[in-house]
Amino acid sequence: MRHLLPAVIIISLPMWTAALASAAAPKAVWSEEAETFATPGGMRFGTALADDGTASGGKAVRIPFRADANGWSMVFSAPRMEMRGQVLFTFWLRAEDVPPLTPGFKLTLVAHDKHSGSWAFHRETRVYGANLRAQGYTAVTLALDAPWTGDTYGPEVILQWDAPPKGVVPVMYLDKAEIAVPAFDAPRVLEISPLKIRYGPGEQVVIRTSLVNPTAAPVEAALVGEEIRAADTRREVFRENVRLAAGEEKQVASSYVLGPEEYGREIRVRLLVGAQEVAAGRDFFAVSRLPLWGAGGSSGDRSYWAGNSGAGSFYVGPASGQDSWRGAQYWKKMRRVYFEFFSWAPGDISDLAPTDDLFPGGEGRLAYRSRQTILQQNRMLRSVGIWPVSYGNGTCWAESGYKLFQQHPEWFLYDANGEIAGYEMDGRELYRRKDDADFDPGAYQHIFFQACLNHSLPAVQEYVARQFIRCGREMGFAGVRLDVRYLEVYPGERGFDGKEVATTYPEADRISAAAVKRIKALVHKELPEFTFGYNYAAPEEVKDMMATFQERCEGGAWMLDELPCTYQEKTSSYHVWKTYVRRMMSWADQVNNLGGVYNPYDFNRGSMEHSIDLIYSAIFRIICGGRDYGGWYHNSRQPVGDYGAFTTRFSEYLHNANRDWIADPQGEVEVRSAAPLWWEDMCFRTRSSDGRKCLQVNLVNPPKAAEVMENPRSEINPPVRDITVICAPSEGQKPAAACLLAGEPMELTGLNEIQVVQLDLRQADGGKVAVTVPSVLFWKMVVFQF
């Protein structure tokens, strides 16, 4: 769900803000110089009043970072006041030795209950160097959402530094602060929320619109919904009358039927009073025929700590229904379509449908899970459009694997010595005592059995298919992703008779491709929408098994390329950004053309010290057409845009099945700029859902350092401005239109917003056309439409 904000210029507002055409500007109810509200007891770790000729009153509070600081540096409060709706806190700030993206300067906005003094509600957020002008003070406005039923609260602000990079000693100066409350002269749109994050073509969409009438009079209004797809193809999808009593909050459910087109949608809802728009809002959702094709979404917002989002309820550990539902709503808010239950099963491929309510998960480790909880969680995820997938280790583990081995030793693979992968009697004896009262779970350190099935055997293929079908029917999963083994065989592996299953890689490839194809067909006969996914999707890993790789990709399978998680290492040639870009674009194009959903891992599985590396890794993996299981980098307070929202709205230009990489765009595209831009390896041809042929040119302001992990201050290049992009005719046709797709603002201190900007075409030499792009901070996309 998305909170919608009034039409004031606020640096911090997220991209889903809505213009309220008739709402009056907020009214300031408290404003003071810092030297007035600062108190000795509210300043520590070197924080103090200081003379400052650039401050409005000649003085400011100087807030330095101190390595010995433990907690807040400054706390101040304002008199009790009535708070309703969205309360705006404005701070006049300037900084010294603060790089653009790190460290964060944390502000916690608090409203204290008037009776108990406890925190009634609060918001934690951050200010970064990029949010501030280079010279003088910048007014930074942050919003705190209060209930729309008026009450009196005590405002408080807590200020604290994050730990900076080595060698950075940041200082923040606070000149003054102000609190403003909204005017209550018009009804508001509070939230726009599609019931699900992903729909199929032709499906009925439900849109929930939350409204409030803060005025003292009833309101008769019309609620109008408009759907936008492609760059700017629009249609009105619902219109209905609503009545709001004075002070009433109401949620209205509207529905309409999708057309046959796939890819991202924007839903705009306008509230009209007497034919005049008084409030509006928007949100985005995915539309795809193949369930995982439109998967996008963000990771958690790094500008604040989310607290108990419920997300942790989906792994080992107790989980209440309330926590699980909170988690499902959180993932929906992050626009996540793909959700994987990792390592949950008691035996993986040998037990994907346990019958006991309490069972040892994690491939038979003694980490117990509840069958009923997993069923409940899968129902919750499906209800909001999220596709729940079961992780599956492709080998047989623990008790279930051992029992299967006792029943069918002829189903397993052996080495030249007649041994299976792993088995130890001592561990088996220890495991048998797991239910004894005096058993120590810590003593069981190693899973006692692991072995691989011989997938060349028809009986094994049928057994595996039955396991997947039970996983879907009995456990509620919508798909499976295989790790370690993916239904393949290799040269040198032997059957129960001691003979090699395949003597060469071409033979192993042929056998494996046939096994994958047959197992999928058996499953799809019973569960047509059941999805598959696999590890081992890197070119280095599949070069000898390309027929199997093609069969694995087919039908929109989730293809996890795990090797990029090592590319930050100096031993990898791909730690050089230019080389990394070419690798991502070229390989993702092949996976896409084979029908796979490409998921390249982030550097070090996303655990990088410098945020700039995570930002550029996300940019290049998005441009190549990749998806990220964990969600894209997201920090709503940095001017990089919400990549989860961007990939959802513009999946048409990123995840299009007809998208083709242009390996050498010379002669088709030319870019002219005063400062360097990267674009040559990031041009694509595609066809939009409205049937138009398109050429995409991605413009990236390059990383300041040539290599990963070489920019500890996360410095950035200045914005590149007034860029000329020239496009040649295609098959005798000139582009008829061009637009700019962006999630980032035009200026560093501007507003993150998902936007389509129409660009003026002009004639260029040689029968070509040209457009001008105002600026690129990190990444923007030009789309020429023929």
Image: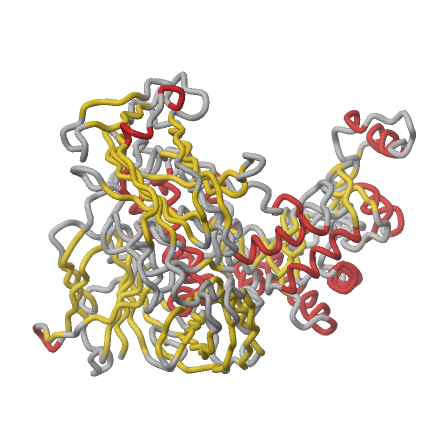
Asked whether, in this view, residue 580 is left or right of residue 596, the answer is left
- Residue 428: x and y in percent read 85, 33
Residue 247 seen: yes
Pick the quarter of the image with the C terminus.
bottom left
Question: Could you tell me which residue is drawn at 58 percent across and 78 percent down?
Answer: 204
Residue 656, above or below 447: below
Q: Position of residue 494 (x, y in %)?
A: 73, 48
Q: Nearer the viewer, residue 566 or 307?
A: 307
Residue that lies at the very extreme toward the right in this rendered image = 436
Using the rendered image of the protein, determine whether residue 595 is visible from the camera's viewpoint. Answer: no
Q: Nearer the viewer, residue 474 or 731?
A: 474
Q: Please name the colour scheme applied to the rendered image.
A: secondary structure
Farthest residue toward the front?
216
Q: Left or right of 760: which side holds 1? A: right
Q: Position of residue 753 (x, y in %)?
A: 34, 59
The residue lying furthest to the left in this view is: 765
Near-viewer residue (299 or 50): 50
* Figure disc tally: 0
Q: Residue at x 25, y 41 (%)?
A: 132
Answer left or right for 415 relative to 289.
right
Q: Nearer the viewer, residue 730 or 620?
A: 620
The answer to whether residue 727 is above or below residue 54 is below
- In the image, is residue 53 above or below residue 488? above
The image position of residue 310, as x and y in percent, is 62, 47
